[in-house]
């Protein structure tokens, strides 16, 4: 897959799965812009490789989804939008309405706002949207009702936007990752017992990496996937089998 001369925006690309996706596109020749909530990419604690440092960076806080309207891109056209923003709240905080609303606003509402904001631009380029869902798009997560509801909502949002925007030359797909080592999953992979138990559930015997998700995102935005739309692709090492 080659993305020379293609412009890619990865919302939430400053860390985690989004960063892996941004790196994959950049390594394939794309001009990539990533967003995060900090003032500069250098403020992130994670190791920054040269590929990520070469990407454009924009500060964007979508806890208020109207902020998408203030985002200025470093390029005039856009070929693909990757929506990788998301949060989770632990210790049963999502059963409190203020937290429930905060998680839903970022994980679902801000994604709808991002997609609609770039609709016209993507239509002109016959572009693609890839939305990052979760295994929680398909099943309950006992202690996280907001996370489960938001990720489940993305499943049907992807289908609806794909149907509504097909005639506008926009393909819309998603990725449902299994276990991937990011800040959101530290509660599992930094606990030895939980981590070992999780491996027993994965036929391929390992957790996924952000770059694993990046390869799938690249495929979904490539010409090779030109007849694919409205799909949530599960990438979990067989955990859901």
Image (spheres, rainbow, N blue to C red):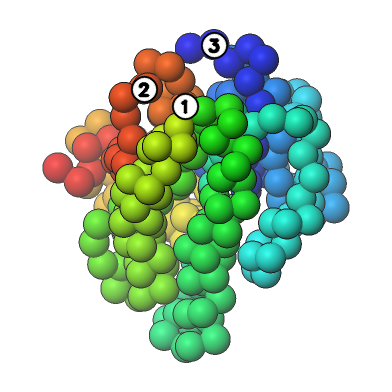
* Dots 2, 3 in contact, CB < 8 A: no
Examine the rendering and report whether any part of residue 118 can be seen.
yes
Instruction: Give how far across and how far down residue 210 sits, in percent.
Output: 50, 36
Q: Earlier in the sequence, mark 2 or mark 3?
A: 3
The residue that disc 1 covers is 221
Please state if 223 lies on the left or on the right of 231 as rendered. Answer: right
Instruction: Give how far across and how far down residue 95 sits, in percent.
Output: 41, 85
* Dots 1, 2 in contact, CB < 8 A: yes
Tell me the quarter of the picture where residue 123 sits: top right
Quadrant of the rendering where the C terminus is positioned:
top left
Depth check, front residue: 139 or 65? 65
Please state if 223 lies on the left or on the right of 54 as rendered. Answer: left
Secondary structure beneath dot 2 equals helix
Instruction: Give how far across and how far down residue 11 sits, in percent.
Output: 63, 46
Examine the rendering and report whether any part of residue 178 can be seen.
no
Residue ID at (36%, 63%): 153
| Circle number at residue 2 | 3
Depth check, front residue: 1 or 157? 157
Residues at marks 2 and 3, CA–CA distance in whole angstroms: 13 Å
Secondary structure beneath dot 3 equals loop
Residues at marks 1 and 2, CA–CA distance in whole angstroms: 7 Å
């Amino acid at each position: 897959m080659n993305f020379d001369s293609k412009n890619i925006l990865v919302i939430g690309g400053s860390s985690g799965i989004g960063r892996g996706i941004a790196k994959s596109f950049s390594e394939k020749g794309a001009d990539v812009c990533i967003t995060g909530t900090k003032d500069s990419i250098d403020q992130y604690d994670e190791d920054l490789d040269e590929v990520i440092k070469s990407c454009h960076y924009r500060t964007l806080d979508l806890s208020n989804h109207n902020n998408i309207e203030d985002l200025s891109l470093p390029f005039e056209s856009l070929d693909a939008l990757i929506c990788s923003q998301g949060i989770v709240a632990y210790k049963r905080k999502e059963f409190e309405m203020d937290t429930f609303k905060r998680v839903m606003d970022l994980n679902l509402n801000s994604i709808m706002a991002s997609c609609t904001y770039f609709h016209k631009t993507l239509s002109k380029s016959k572009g693609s949207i890839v939305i990052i869902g979760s295994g929680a798009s398909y099943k309950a997560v006992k202690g996280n009702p907001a996370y489960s509801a938001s990720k489940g909502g993305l499943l049907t949002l992807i289908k609806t936007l794909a149907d509504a925007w097909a005639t506008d030359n926009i393909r819309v797909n998603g990725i449902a990752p299994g276990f991937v080592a990011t800040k959101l999953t530290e509660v599992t992979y930094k606990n030895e017992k939980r981590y070992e138990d999780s491996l027993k559930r994965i036929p391929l015997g390992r957790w996924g990496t952000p770059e694993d998700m990046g390869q799938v995102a690249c495929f979904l935005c490539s010409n090779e996937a030109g007849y694919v739309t409205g799909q949530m692709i599960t990438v979990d090492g067989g955990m859901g089998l």
